[in-house]
Image (tube, rainbow, N blue to C red):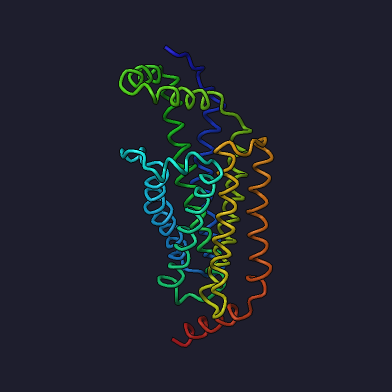
Amino acid sequence: MTEIANVSAKQFVMLVFGAILMIAGPIVIAVIWTKKKKERFTTILVGAATFLLFAIILEKPVQALLIAPTQMGLPDTGISQFINARPVLLALFMGIFPGVFEETGRLLAFKTLLRKRKKRETSIAYGIGHGGFEVIIFLGITYISNISIAVMINSGAFGTVLELVRSQAPEQADSLVTLGSAIASFSFADLALGTIERIFGVLFHIGASIIVFYACRDKGRIWLYPIAILLHTAMDFVAGMTATGVLTLPVWAIEVILAAFGVSSFLGAYLLLYKRDRDGKAAEELILDNATKR
C-alpha cells in the first residue's frame, strides 16, 4: 500500500481558506460592483450561465470528440491521431476551442439577453460573472474536493480507496497517488500561485467582455469580436504549448506570460474602449431619467 503523509492542520486551514476565497471572492466582487454601479445582478448571472453553456457544456465535448474521442468511450479517429501526433497543432486546437466558443458566447449574450443594456458597466459586470464562475467551478470546487481527500488521507480511508482503484482501474491509480501526494504537500506557495493566476484570468475575461460588448453595441465595431477570439486563442495556445511539452519554461515564466495576456487585455480594453466611452455614460443617464419619470 502506498504511504502518503498526513495533511497537517496548517494545510487544512489553507485548503479551507482557498475554498472560501475561490467561492466567496467572486460573489463578493460581483455584489460590490452591481451595487456600486447600479447594474442588475442578472448581468452577472448571464455571464456565469454563458460560461457554463459555451465553455463546459458545448466546448468540452466537441473538443474531446475531435482531439480525444477515447475520453468519450469512442475509438481514435484519423483526425485525432493526426492532431495528437503534432504537438504544436494540438496546442493550437487547445487555444482555438476556448477562443471561438467563449467569445461567441459573449457575443450572443450581448446580442440577445443583454441587448437592451447599453451602459458600459454592463461589460465589466458580465466579465465578472463569466470569469468569476470559472474560478468557482474550477478552483472552488477543486478545493472542496481536495478537502474531502485530505480527510480521507488522515482517516486512512484514502489507502483503501487507492487499493480498490488499483484492482478495478489500475491505469488511474498513479494519478490518484499523485493527487494525494500533492494535497499532502500543499503549501502557501500553491495557494498564492493559484490565487494570482486566477486574478489575471479574471482580468482577461473582463477585458475580453469589454471588447465584445463594444463589438455588439457600437455599429461598425464588429471587428472587435475576432480580435477577442485571437487574444483568447493566443493565450490558451501558449498554455497548450506548455501542456504538450513544446515549451519547457519554468512555472514562473509561464505565469508571467499568462499574466501579461490578462493585464494587457484588460488595460487595453479599459483604456481604449471603456474609459473613452461617452455614449455609454449618456445611455446610463437616459435610463435613469426614464426610470425617474416613471
In x, y percent, where is residue 192?
62, 38
Classify 202 as above or below 77.
below
Q: Quadrant of residue 91?
A: top right
In x, y percent, where is residue 229?
54, 61
Q: Is residue 125 visible?
A: yes
Residue closer to the observer: 211 or 277: 211
Classify 241 as above or below 123.
above
Q: Residue furthest bottom?
A: 293
In x, y percent, where is residue 82?
45, 43
Q: Residue furthest top?
A: 1
Q: Quadrant of residue 78?
A: top left
Residue closer to the observer: 240 or 179: 240
- Seen at 54% across and 63% down, the residue is 209
- Seen at 40% across and 50% down, the residue is 56
Q: Quadrant of the N terminus?
A: top left
- Seen at 38% across and 51% down, the residue is 62
Q: Quadrant of the C terminus?
A: bottom left
- 263 left or right of 46? right
Q: Is residue 27 visible?
A: no
In x, y percent, where is residue 25?
53, 49
Counting every numbered tag in the picture gives 0
- Seen at 67% across and 75% down, the residue is 276
